[in-house]
Image (cartoon, helix red, strand yellow):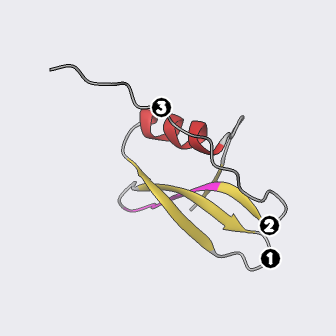
Amino acid sequence: MFFRKKTIETIKYDETIRRPAIRSSICTGERVAGFENLETGKFEEIQLLQSERDLEQFKKRYGITGEIRTIY
């Protein structure tokens, strides 16, 4: 079988309202990537992170460079 390589389109987000963050559980170690609303402080879950590859895909999809803040 031949498979096409999927291309990831960059999705824009409003940097004045939301910032990228990773929420990590202290007990289980589960990590979720998403965005934190700067006005309300609420966290919007986008993607479960099971490996570093998932984190790189999240960064590429939203055009994020550099480090992402971790919330515990």
Q: CA distance from mark 2 to mark 3?
A: 27 Å
Q: Amino acid at mark 2?
A: Ile
Residue nearer the viewer, 6 or 15: 6
Badge 1: residue crowd in 10 Å (few <14, some 14–19, many ≥20): few
Q: Can you tell which mark lies on residue 61? A: none
State the SS at label 3: loop
Dot 2 corresponds to which residue?
17
Q: Can you tell which mark lies on residue 39? A: 1
Q: Amino acid at mark 3?
A: Thr
The residue shown at (51%, 36%) is 8
Residue nearer the viewer, 3 or 43: 3
The image quarter containing residue 50 is top left
Residue nearer the viewer, 12 or 49: 12
Q: Can you tell which mark lies on residue 7? A: 3
Residue 46 at what x, y percent from top left? 50, 59
The image quarter containing residue 67 is top right
Mark 1 vs 3, N-terminal side: 3
Classify the position of the C terminus by image quarter.
bottom right
Q: Please give the range of residues in magenta.
A: 21-27
Residue 17 at what x, y percent from top left? 80, 67
Of all residues shown, which one is farthest toward the left?
1
Mark 2 vs 3, N-terminal side: 3
Whether label 2 touches label 1, CB < 8 Å: yes
Of all residues shown, which one is farthest toward the top?
2
Q: CA distance from mark 2 to mark 1?
A: 7 Å
Image check: 34 left or right of 48?
Answer: right
Residue 53 at what x, y percent from top left? 43, 33
